[in-house]
Image (spheres, helix red, strand yellow):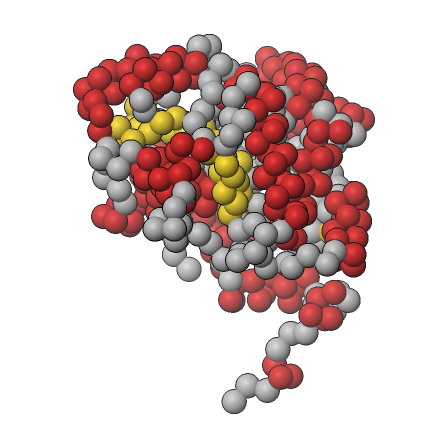
Amino acid sequence: MTSTHDFIRADDVLSGKLSDAQTVYLEKKYGHGKLIRLLEVVGTGGPFKVKSPWELEDRAGQTVINASGYAALPFGDNPPELNLFLRQVLEQTDQVMFGQQSITTWRAALETNLVRLLARESGDHHDSRVFFSNSGTEAVEAAIKFAQAARPKAKYLINFTRAYHGKTLGALAVTPNPNLQGPFKNILNPAVITLPYGDAEAVERAIKRVGDQVIAVLLEPILGEAGVRIPPPGFLKRVGEVCRTKGVIVIADEIQTGLGRSGHWFESVAQGLIPDILTLAKPLGGGMLPVGATIVRHEIYKPLLGSVETIKRHSNTFGGNSLAMAVGLKSLEILLDNDYPARSRRLGERGLTRLKAVQRQHPALIEEVRGAGMLFAMNFHPVAKLPFKLQGELIAEVTGMLALVAFYRSGVLLNFSLNAARTMRLTPAMNMPEELFDRMFDDVEAAAAEHPSSFALVQKYGTPELLSLVKAAFLED
């Protein structure tokens, strides 16, 4: 029988009694051991201490600039303004925290502000509704269900190559990555038509061929996990025109791009598309709490949740809870008060100019760079002359990992791209101080200068270190 002495107390964690070494051991033993082992070998796994909202200190005492927020940290890690606000909410609010079967002020306020913001930017959506959840993938699940309920006789969803919408089953079905879909293929919705991203004519042909059987077109205004892939001008606008003519619903997945990250409040709207359904998540929680939101035209909302008969067809336990709504409301307020989309656009242009210069100086290392606002990507040439044989996608994976290590050692923590293994992204906080922002690109430049080719990435590491990395990544534990 296990006694209470065998359990870790919350105070042990709060006081720092649980050491870094113990933390790593426990994570490997009881958590995602494979990932922890890989991060440990790569050297980017932490545990980290927050030096500032934009900088982390690792176990060795190195301070790195955090550009790895996956677009979910609009104000950095543990931002003081949100931290203080969260404490005020906990101390002062008399609202119920769990408002599943009751009206709450926090939820009402955030719903209102999101609809008003979308209406202001699009000139439409004045009567739309908001459904809250706990993540981006849940927001996409809700979007798919709203669309299907509104077009019950239709069966096909149209998505695009290299898209990423999440890993729960509905979202995964429209994420055409064979590795991610893998063992779940048999239970995923087979009625998905995948078209080349950026090809509006292909959308028009598909809708003409399938006719009234198309439920919705689901798209990202910029492909995030494919490495910040920007569509050709006019693509989104044309898709919207085709769908409107045929009565097909358009879902814009703005989970990475929305609320200022790309330099606009809503990237789809900036590109000329007014979607019928729009999903938000990452920045809405301010990097503090998970918040997902699905904004839906009223006429599309009603078939799923507009009557007593249908109202139970979609819900979740904690979506819309008061604490998450309070943080979402404050996060949106900070974004609005500081006009962070404009700042992202301005600094994004500066950062992309720096990246392009680095690429020109080191073309044997960096194949291509891309950027939109505070979304940046570097596509690396595949590593060559490894001291052992690897093929295909494994070479791409090793390339990405070696690039991650090289730039980390120069002081910048990047993030992977799930649909582009050789592409590393920088997704810094939208409020990063300009001096630190410039230093981040200084560090990027220094890392590239030290590794002027993809072969140089390999040369920096001995065969034993490389073998350890490959074993950690690709061999079974």
Q: List the single residue furthest toward the front.
A: 308
Q: Position of residue 472 (x, y in %)?
A: 47, 52
In terms of depth relative to the viewer, which is nearer, 134 or 345?
A: 134
In terms of depth relative to the viewer, which is nearer, 214 or 232?
A: 214
Q: Is residue 415 left or right of residue 197?
A: right
Q: Is residue 469 left or right of residue 57?
A: left
Q: Is residue 106 visible in the rendered structure shown here? A: yes
Q: Quadrant of residue 156?
A: top left
Q: Is residue 353 above or below residue 93?
A: above
Q: Is residue 270 above or below residue 299?
A: above
Q: Position of residue 407 (x, y in %)?
A: 63, 34
In terms of depth relative to the viewer, which is nearer, 101 or 43?
A: 101
Q: List the single residue furthest toward the top.
A: 233
Q: Is residue 172 visible in the rendered structure shown here? A: no
What's the residue at 51%, 26% (across, down)?
A: 125
What's the residue at 58%, 65% (across, down)?
A: 25
What's the residue at 68%, 74% (across, down)?
A: 9
Q: List the single residue furthest toward the left.
A: 209
